[in-house]
Each structure stands twice: as structure tokens, then as C-alpha cells.
Image (cartoon, helix red, strand yellow):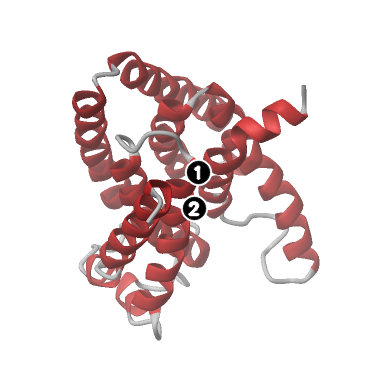
Amino acid sequence: MDSNLAAAVTAAFVAGILATFGPAWLARLPEPEDAEPDKRTYVDLASTRRLALWLALVAAVVAGTVGLTIDGYAILPLWVFLAAVGALLGFVDWHTRRLPARMVVPSYVVVFVLLAIAGLVSGDWSRAGQALLSGVVVFALYFLGWLVFPRGMGYGDVRLSGILGIALGWLGWSEVVVGIYAGFVFGATLGFILSRMRIVDAKGFPFGPFMLVGAWFGAIAGPAVARALG
């Protein structure tokens, strides 16, 4: 089997397995104190029919395509983790318009550990440093956007942005730029379409899922998009 295909299959399998634990994690999550009266509870969301299967499928597709695309596999475990957690976060945000801090903040610890392992395995500490710098820059940009326009962006999006910046930063700056920009493009275009279809509220819809899809798009298509744009 081709090494790229083997890495992609392995990444997809592991991400899918990890994602199946998502509903159990969600069911144990405490409800936020400032939750809206009509918010669906995490226990209720966790009991969604075939949720584990759908999370596993999404995570497997994301991790598998990234594994098939990127050069070098040192950072792939980080993307496997992000695929599994991101599938769950996207689901939760879509149904509650919240990215729970109790999911996002602990994920930073795992991401830092996996980034350090990637640096050790590859010996490429400059890439690890680039990933951290990217995380700081992307976090700062989102934080500034939240300060300027807090009604258009939740602080949960700001928390998540640093993780996405780190994951993309290892791959390269074209991946970072395309991945972050794509999130806004997808959010604007698909959000408009979905609001016209009355699937989401035009005055406010979750941005986290679009951030995650944008990051995935940047990882698999960033260099190609950058070359096409000149």
C-alpha cells in the first residue's frame, strides 16, 4: 500500500474511533450558567440518534483527506485529534451557538503535547515555532474582531481560533491564510444561503462549524489556492 494512502487510512480509522467517544463526553459536560432558556441541554444533544456514527464519519473524512494531502506525518496525530474534537464542537455549536470552554480549553493541552511530539519526531523545531506563532497571530486577529464587533463573533470562536492557527501553522503560511479566510467566506456565503432557506437565523448563526470547515479546506487546498491566486 502507498505510504500516503496507508497514513490516510490509519488517520481516518483512529479519528473515527476517537469521535465515537464524543457523545459520552458531551453528556458529562456541565451546563453553562448563562445558558439561554431555550438552549438544548448537552445530555439531550448527546442522545441524538446515531450521533456517534455521524461524528465518526465526519472525523474520518477530515483526518483521512488531510493524511492523504499533507507532506510528512509528524503533525498528523494533531490533525487526527482536531478532526475528532472538531466534529463534536461543530455539532454542539450548530445546535447551541456555543463552543464550550470545557471542551476547547483542555484541547489546547493536547494540541501542545502533540505539537511537541511532532517537533521531536521530525526534528523540525522551526516548524513547531511557526505553528505557535501562527496560533498567536490567528488568536490575536480573532480577539481583535471580537473586540470590534462582539455581536458578530462569540468568544468561543476566539478560543478555537488559536488551535486552528497552530494546526495550520505547521503546514505553512498559505494554509493559514487560506484556511482562516475560507472560514469567513464559507460563513458569509453559506450562512446567507441557509438564512434564505430559513435553516438558520440571518441575525445570528454559529460560526464555529464554518471555521472548522475552512481550516480543513486550508489544510488540503491551501497551496493550490495560493498558486492559483498568483
Can you say which quadrant of the picture contains the C terminus?
top right
Q: Indicate whether 99 appears above or below 221.
A: below
Inspect this view and state whether residue 98 appears. Answer: no
The label on residue 69 is 1
Q: Which residue is mark 2?
A: 65
Circle 1: residue type: Thr
Whole-percent x, y for residue 101 in the image? 31, 47
Residue 36 is drawn in which quadrant?
A: bottom left
Callout 1 touching callout 2 (CB < 8 Å): yes
Mark-to-mark CA distance, 1 and 2: 6 Å
Q: How many marks?
A: 2
Camera-side residue of 200 and 180: 180
Q: Residues within 10 Å of mark 1 (few under 14, many from 20)?
A: some
Q: Residue furthest front?
A: 1
Q: Indicate whether 200 appears above or below 170.
A: below
Whole-percent x, y for residue 85 in the image? 34, 55
Whole-percent x, y for residue 11 in the image? 34, 54
User: What residue appears at the point 78 percent right and 61 percent down from the top-left corner?
Assistant: 193
